[in-house]
Amino acid sequence: MTALTLTTGRNDSARPLPWRRMVLVTWLQHRGVLVGVAALFGALAIYLSIMGLIVHHAWTVDMDCHPASSLTCQNLAGSFATQWHSGATIAFPLQLLPALIGAFAGAPMLAREMETGTFRYAWTQDFGRTRWIIAKLTLVGGPLAVMAGAFGILTYWYFGPFVPGQLNPLDPRTFALECLALPGWVLAAFAIGAFVGMLIRRVVPAMATAMAVAGGLGLAADLYLRQHYLPPLVMVSANGPAQSAWTLGSWYTGRGGQVVSAETVNMACPGPGPYGSTPGAPAQCMPKHGYTQLWSYQPASRYWPFQGLESGGLLLLAILLVAATIWLVHRRAA
Amino acid sequence: MNIIETAGLGKNYGRTWALRDCTFAMPEGHLAALVGPNGAGKTTLLHLLVGLTNAAAGTATVLGGLPAGSRAALNGIAFVAQDAPVYTNLTAANMIRLARNLNRNFDPPYARARLGELDIPLDRKAAKLSGGQRAQLALTLALAKRPRLLILDEPLASLDPLARHDFMGTVLAAVGEDGVSVLMSSHALAELQRVADFLIVLTKGQVRVADTAEDLASTHRVLTGPAGSADQVARKLHVVQDQRGEAQAHLLVKTHGPKEPVPPGWEAHPAGMEELVLAYLRSAGETGPAPLPSKPTASTGAAR
């Protein structure tokens, strides 16, 4: 029982274990989530591909019709709009994806270790707990972002024919599902889940919180935040901005440039609706009274800048939350 | 070489100290028992030694001077936490693969062979194993790390008598074959008395005793004599526990060695480890984890 026999064959090198060792560890522990998310994205991708091919075929026929003003072409366009009037509805369930991934992939990652006590096993192994959590977050978050990126390209293609007829490019229903924004949202939701999981340390409450926070943030972005990424443009027009623009609001001004309520304008220039309630008082009448209609909107040309801004902001959020999670694991005294 | 050494080690949770001014050294090659009432700070001490908790005061080193919780220390220490946590959704075979990748010196053939000896199926998920099998799986994963120090937190608590026996058999085999040092916290005094050769008693966050069983036996004795002269005798000695009957008194005293003279009219007996542990637990004003063995001559409520 001497120290010599004890240390025979032992490798006590001070070099840390190689990172690649975490690949199998992460796979063994999180393959359920990774396979589940991949299956979900895969099933949705198959559906969107088949539907997308059909829609695109109809759309191409529509687009190739010449001259566009002919009755045949008008009918064709009309029948496309009628047949596919609900083609973009799939966007609503798809909007749940990031929050679901945050709740099912992010939140349990640490909450389950904390709840079942297995962190006391994981954190006392040779690999070291700080490197352990860095590796796990990277090896799960990375594939999720890649899958979301591929899926975002597919949705961008799928929703193409509905622009600008049913959707504008910046439409809150679809913007977050496309291109750069979707992987941003998935990463942010995953990081939110991991962070609240480490804070709350119980699986079910952490999942519920992650779902609420990620979902709430998504809703807030759609309804309030995104329209302020760049100052909206303002135009004077009786008819509003182009169909492809994201129209945010409309108001009236009087002769001196002061804001005038729609009621006042309608009183002077009654619209066709009952009690003159329909907006858009006759164009000839308004100048006579010195009224001007103004519109604020985000032009379609801002699609890519907004995609970049949203994705970049979410990536920053995800990095901050991941760093906070790593810090919590690093310093937590159990 | 000291496998564990602490100096002024302390840990507080808010205003209460879970562990305070804890100083002791444990030489290599022992199977040490860490005993103390619930809430005495046993788990806190073990967590400090494996780096799951950060010390608020003092220092702890392991394996001959490595800072507790450092990566070098975790390489040579295996820890089985309370309730033997394993990933219940993984099979034993996959736990072995996982452990192999998290550790430098992990020995998969050893782990597989041991689980085979224990009839624990490799392809069964840990969730479907019995409590005893899960504890054995956790212990196997710990031993397959080829540690120099094995730390076990209440490993016997949830096990039935047969599983306890098997579990301790495995621990003892590791001590005997590989020379692993062991520190285990437990309430199972009777089991510890059989196997432990080093004793650490912790009460109210403070170390009362940390010594080898041999030294404890040679420095403690039970003096039995007339109750009338007990006060006089007790005044001159370091009395750990004082039990008075109507005629006789039993004093468990700490001496400077077996050669110290016995007071005239008194008899000296060696103190058993269990008796000693209980005496120290009681002397701290705590209720011990097990009832005091009844002594025919001790009157009720006369202790202390």
Image: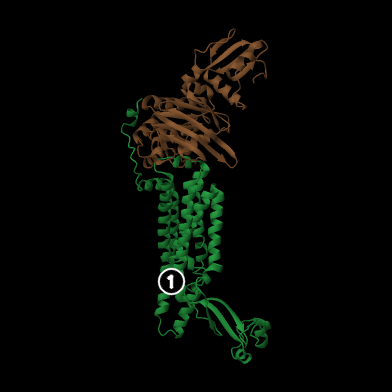
Chain colours: A green, B brown
Residue A221 vertical position relative to residue B122 in the rendered view, above or below: below
Q: Quadrant of residue A6?
A: top left
Residue B278 vertical position relative to residue A288 in the rendered view, above or below: above
Q: Nearer the viewer, residue A66 or B129?
A: B129
Residue A158 vertical position relative to residue A266 in the rendered view, above or below: above
* Residue B244 pos. (x, y %): 65, 15
Farthest residue in the left direction? A9
Q: Residue at x 68, y 86 (%)?
A: A267
Can residue A183 be seen here? The reply is yes
Can residue B163 be seen here? The reply is no
Q: How many marks?
A: 1
* Residue B288 pos. (x, y %): 60, 25
Q: Quadrant of residue B37?
A: top right
Q: Nearer the viewer, residue A256 or B163?
A: A256
Farthest residue in the top direction? B265
* Residue B123 pos. (x, y %): 41, 38
SS assignment at label 1:
helix
Judge the density around disc 1: few (<14), some (14-19), many (≥20) Cα neighbours within 10 Å.
Answer: some
Farthest residue in the front direction? B236
Name the quadrant of the N terminus of chain A.
top left
Q: Amino acid at mark 1?
A: Trp
Q: Residue at x 52, y 62 (%)?
A: A93
Left or right of B266, for residue A180: left
Chain that bears disc 1:
A
Q: Quadrant of residue A274?
A: bottom right
Residue linked to disc 1: A304
Q: Nearer the viewer, residue A287 or B42?
A: B42
